[in-house]
Amino acid sequence: MNKIIYTKSAPNPVGPYSQAIIANGFLYCSGQIAINPDNDTFLDGSIEEQTKQVMKNIKAVLDEAGYSFNDVIKTTCFLDDMKNFNIFNEIYAQYFISKPARSCVEAKLPKNAKVEVEIIAYKA
């Protein structure tokens, strides 16, 4: 049976989806952009500021589900401009020490965000 994950410490979904779902030990987390969950406002800042907020949002969902960054096995990362790849990687590496599998692509993002990250985590 699937379990929907919701925490007030991460942004409210802005559409018909869940923050995350657990199914058979896998945690599927919806993509996170730099929305401050305290006031549901978008942080229209630098790539550094936005990446740090995205990681805070991911951590909040992981915590609520009883998972950690070390349980993450796959990430999909979206950048609005690949010129930000190195800066993004520096911050990303501070959180994903276990080096999960990853895809990273350039894309047009909601709210003109500079970065969006979605994750899959697993606990046996």
Image (cartoon, rainbow, N blue to C red):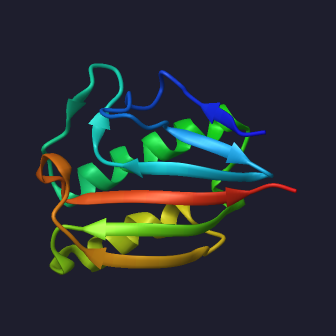
Q: Could you say where residue 81 lies in the image, as x and y percent from the top left?
A: 15, 74
Q: Is residue 102 left or right of residue 14?
A: right
Question: Relative to residue 120, is residue 18 depicted above or below?
Answer: above
Question: Relative to residue 62, is residue 5 depicted above or below?
Answer: above
Q: Residue at x 63, y 55 (%)?
A: 69
Quarter of the image that includes the N terminus: top right
- Camera-side residue of 88 and 34: 34
Quarter of the image that includes the C terminus: bottom right
- Camera-side residue of 55 and 74: 74
Q: Is residue 89 left or right of residue 64?
A: left
Q: Residue at x 19, y 36 (%)?
A: 42
Q: Quadrant of residue 2?
A: top right
Q: Quadrant of residue 61?
A: top right
Q: Quadrant of residue 10?
A: top left
Q: Could you say where residue 82 lies in the image, as x and y percent from the top left?
A: 20, 79
Q: Could you say where residue 103 lies in the image, as x and y percent from the top left?
A: 44, 78
Q: How many marks?
A: 0
Q: Residue at x 38, y 48 (%)?
A: 32
In this view, which residue lies farthest toward the right?
Answer: 124
Q: Residue at x 37, y 32 (%)?
A: 13
- Camera-side residue of 111 and 9: 111
Question: Relative to residue 94, is residue 22 depicted above or below?
Answer: above
Q: Could you say where residue 111 lies in the image, as x and y percent from the top left?
A: 14, 46
